[in-house]
Image: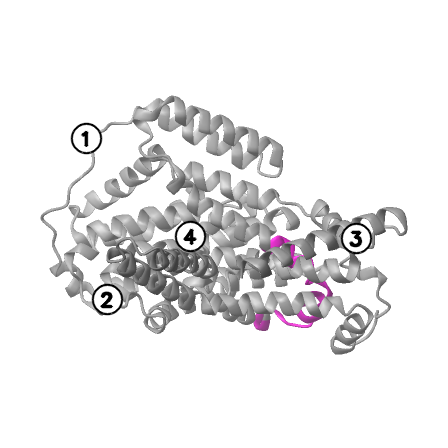
Amino acid sequence: MRTALCFLIGLVCWLAGSNLVHAEIDEPIETFPRPLSTYSDAGLPPGAQLWDRLSTEPLNGIATLIFILAILHTFAAPKFMALSHRFAEEADRMSAGNGEDRNRCGKCDRLRFFSVMCHFLGEVEAIFGIWLVPLACAVAAMKGFPTVFKYLDEVHFAEPIFVVAIMTMAASRPIVRFTENCLSAVASLGGKSVAAWWLSILTLGPLLGSFITEPAAMTICALLLADRFFKANPPMTLRYATLGLLFVNISIGGTLTHFAAPPVVMVASKWGWTTGHMLEFFGWKAVLSILISNILVFFVFRRSLFSLSLTDVEDDRKHRIPLWITLVHMAMIGWVVFTAHHPPVVILSFLFFLAFVLATPSHQGEFDLVIFRGPLLVGFFLAALVIHGGFQQWWLAPVLQDLGRWPLMLSSTVLTAFNDNAAITYLASLVPNLDDSLKFAVVAGAVAGGGLTVIANAPNPAGQTLLQQFFGEDGIHPAYLFAAAVVPTLIVGAILMLLP
């Protein structure tokens, strides 16, 4: 296996070198993907347009096939995770009794290697990045490595850089504590009962996601639900109803601003959407949707909610964070949001933020690699998505522009259930001259369907990780989650599309 790996690496390096020299001396660097204006298919029906573009540039089909395989890979992610756990357990069993047996020790190392590799293949946020490897090889083989480098040099990574910075800053201890205090103040209106905490977390928590980002809101809401609700041992039907509400509300709750929800971030700059635009067309509808869904579920499960009680909840108020530190964190988050479209400024500001964190360690908690893991994975996912998306323009315009408002919204909702909603909106942003009503429809469908599955919205895996311990030995069942999220999804979709 090592010999084959070395041979593969050597072959790739040889191809890279030969293509670089060939392109530099003999030929100019070829452009791929081809600009849409270079296709002579104007006036053709959508099907004929697609066939003409595919026959003119066969690499279009290869790039799209790789993208489809990446999407299919997301369905197999849980299987890879199960294999990872299996290899790890087998390695632990073998190492417990291997003694001085070097052969068995070597086998343990191989099992741990396979465990890590399967875990990597099972990370939903890493999948699109993994499939960049065959994509780059395909483009390099047919167009040369200089074409790959030229394409990457022209890709804009402002959104992934911004998301990594803002997620890390929002997950800092002062911001998390401030958010918890806001939720606690609302819950105190109901005597801080389990029912009051439930309603407060599922209503205010997702809306705060419009300011501290959806992933941060998901983390805080899931942690609070675990301590203030799930530990009260509610019925399993109520647990799934709560989980479905949480996922749907988080997905729609980030639409009050243009910088907090990944599916909105991916199109806001391209389409010129501001926070004012989001409040006018999405924000107030998001608030109304969350209120209606929460009240409906609360009414259905009111007896169970009022019967729950907790007596051993500990409030973490021992360490008081000075107000000025919280204000500095909030000001730096506001500055990063204001400069979101200027990556160098965002990076420098983020470095200043990290310096401030290091200068105030006693008020920051454990600010280590664990804090960076989620933001880096989401950033890696978005960066890989941007790279893949640039190769999909050849088919997007003929397909999306041929759909009406309602069919596009429904298609966006269904596709979101099988893929991250940021991928859906980003692909739509690549379509030139898309009608404003179609822009609204595709984003409405993407955020409405963000709670149907774990992979439908980037923050969902974090919520699943934190709460799956309360759903039995097998964890959260995908079918039950889908069933629990259907009604809130229909409410969100109807409000978004039917109200003016």
Q: Tell me if residue 391 is in the magenta stretch.
A: yes
Left or right: residue 88 compared with residue 385:
left
**Which numbered tag is attached to residue 253?**
4
Q: Is residue 78 left or right of residue 5?
A: left
Q: Amino acid at mark 2?
A: Glu
Q: Earlier in the sequence, mark 3 or mark 2?
A: 3
- Magenta stretch, residue numbers: 385-407
478 and 88: which one is in front? 88
Q: What residue is pinned by disc 2?
A: 473
Q: Mark 3 Cα within 10 Å, few/some/many (few <14, many 20+)?
A: some
Q: Nearer the viewer, mark 4 or mark 2?
A: 2
Label 4 packing within 10 angstroms: few (<14), some (14-19), many (20+)? many
Give the mark nearer the N terminus: 3 vs 1. 3
Residue 286: x %, y % from top left: 43, 55
Badge 4 or badge 2: first in the primary sequence: 4
Query: Colour scheme in the image?
Result: one colour
Q: How many numbered marks are there?
A: 4
Q: Position of residue 86 (x, y in %)?
A: 34, 65
Label placed on residue 318: 1
Mark 3 vs mark 4, CA separation in Å:
49 Å
Three-letter code, disc 1: Lys
Q: Amino acid at mark 3?
A: Asn
Secondary structure state at the residue bearing disc 2: loop
